[in-house]
Amino acid sequence: MARNEVRPVVRLRSTAGTGHTYVTRKNRRNDPDRMVLRKYDPVVRRHVDHREER
């Protein structure tokens, strides 16, 4: 099964300014806007918002 542009790979960068990133996939049909997830940042040792970057 080929990969397509409906589920692209996106990088989630920490809003704490540490440069920490997560890599995930998202469904563009369900989530056309940029994703914001609250995930753990090990540099600041807290949960912070991670925003999608392009």
Image (tube, rainbow, N blue to C red):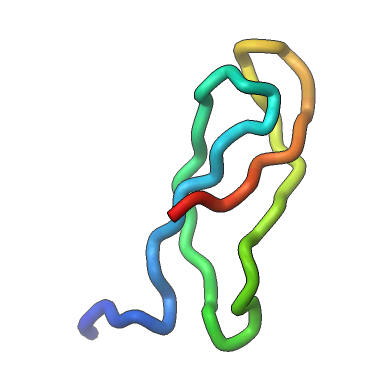
Q: Residue furthest top?
A: 44
Residue 17 location (% of width, % of height) = 62, 21
Residue drawn at x 62%, y 32% is: 14
Position above or below: 1 against 22: below
Residue 16 location (% of width, % of height) = 69, 23
Residue 37 location (% of width, % of height) = 71, 49
Position of the N terminus by quadrant? bottom left
Residue 41 figure quarter: top right
Residue drawn at x 76%, y 31% is: 48
Position of the C terminus by quadrant? bottom left
Residue drawn at x 46%, y 48% is: 11
Residue 4 figure quarter: bottom left
Q: Tell how many labels.
A: 0
Residue drawn at x 56%, y 52% is: 52
Q: Depth check: give the residue in front, 20 or 40.
A: 20
- Asked if residue 26 lies left or right of residue 40, the reply is left
Position above or below: 5 against 23: below
Q: Residue furthest left?
A: 2
- Asked if residue 20 lies left or right of residue 36, the reply is left
